[in-house]
Amino acid sequence: MQTEITSFFNKITAIYKAQKPFVVYRKPNEELVSLIVQNNTKLYELEDYNQQGFVFMPFYNNGSKVLFPAKECSTFQTKITQYDMFLTKNGVVKITNDDNYNKAKEIHINLVEKALKFIKEGKAQKIVLSRKEIIEFSHFNMVNTYKKMLKNYINAFVYVWFHPQVGLWMGATPERLLNIKNNHFKTMALAGTQPFVNTTDVIWEDKELQEQQFVTDFIINNIKNNVDIKEVNGPYTIKAGSLLHLRTDISGELIHLNLLEDLVTALHPTPAVCGLPKNTAQQFILENESYLRTYYSGFLGELNMHNSSQLFVNLRCMQIINNCAEIFVGGGITNESVPEKEFKETVSKSQIMKNIL
């Protein structure tokens, strides 16, 4: 088993060195790690939701809607039950200096204040604002970094995705966009954040409870014409790395077949990564954030594979460019938000990826 796992990771190293498109991923709370390798370097784009393969989709239409088509790919898998064998060395990381930190803090707080004014004028209920941090390192080992992510984030969708025309992305996202198997549909509302301090038995403030309810109501209202909702379970507290979130599980049966595209369009981007109303919040983000999100807060996953589609929101992620990691972090702004606290939340979220590096 140990030899098989070593061989699996050696294969990933060789494929990346050869600059072939690939994705390696493990679903939440599973032992199976899957590697999909595209047999050529062409950039395929998703044309419709009847296609089969692995999708990597942007937050907005400012990036390619990439598909690794199943018919153009080879798949390899291994089961990992123990992670103690993963002894990995840390690279030397240069954390942003105080001047950069203070500048980032000032910019983000100003952005939050602008969003608060917009919300209090009645133009939106919630806007999710994000920023990126750039971390420099002297040496980056993609496979070792991924092993650490697998070990530390058991209950996340943990992945590395690469295409030579797009770049290298890695993440450990706690948020499922949707799961459709046969006629059965599952999704989750995930919102509200606080640091994990020894227990999941915590008190949530009104701001987080309101934020979570916004997401739950949005999902239910947007899927009710396509899904016969059978169960709404939550909200309850979950742990994701060093953070806690509020989660509500929603499940039901599809009213008709071939509703995948309708459901993705209805849900993405959710209020957990965008805001309410969806189009208003998205426009505010595009006009006011200081960078383009590209694939951060987009979605990725299996499309029509193994008789199911399992898609995840691209959170707690980073893009590796040369000797830098661009880490993306954000938080939901409502009329209850306090700008200083919102910045601190993004700092807590950035620690998820910094701990790995």
Image (cartoon, helix red, strand yellow):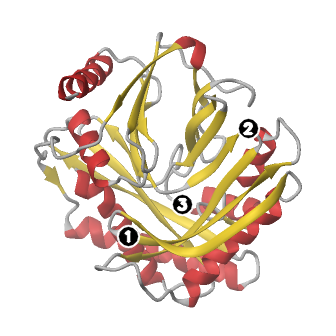
Residue 102 pos. (x, y %): 30, 73
Identify the disc placed on residue 243.
1
On screen, residue 204 versus residue 144, left or right, reads right
Q: Nearer the viewer, residue 285 or 228?
A: 228
Q: Nearer the viewer, residue 54 or 181?
A: 181
Q: Residues within 10 Å of mark 1 (few under 14, many from 20)?
A: some
Residue 156 can be seen, yes or no: yes
Secondary structure under the numbered disc 3 in the rendered image = loop
Of badges 2 and 3, nearer the viewer stands 2
Residue 328 pos. (x, y %): 42, 55
Give the residue at x 55% y 40%: 300
Q: Earlier in the sequence, mark 1 or mark 2?
A: 2
On screen, residue 238 versus residue 176, left or right, reads left
- Distance of mark 1 from mark 2, alpha carbons? 33 Å
Identify the disc placed on residue 175.
none
Q: Nearer the viewer, residue 96 or 74?
A: 74
In the image, residue 99 sits, relative to residue 267, either above or below, namely: below
Q: Are marks 3 and 1 in contact (CB under 8 Å)?
A: no
Task: Specify the quadrant of the image occupied by residue 150.
Answer: top left
Secondary structure under the numbered disc 2 in the rendered image = loop
Give the residue at x 49% y 76%: 110
Report the residue marked by disc 2: 182
Report the residue marked by disc 3: 289
Of badges 3 and 1, nearer the viewer stands 1
Secondary structure under the numbered disc 1 in the rendered image = strand
- The three-letter code of the residue at mark 1 reads Leu
Give the residue at x 42% y 22%: 164
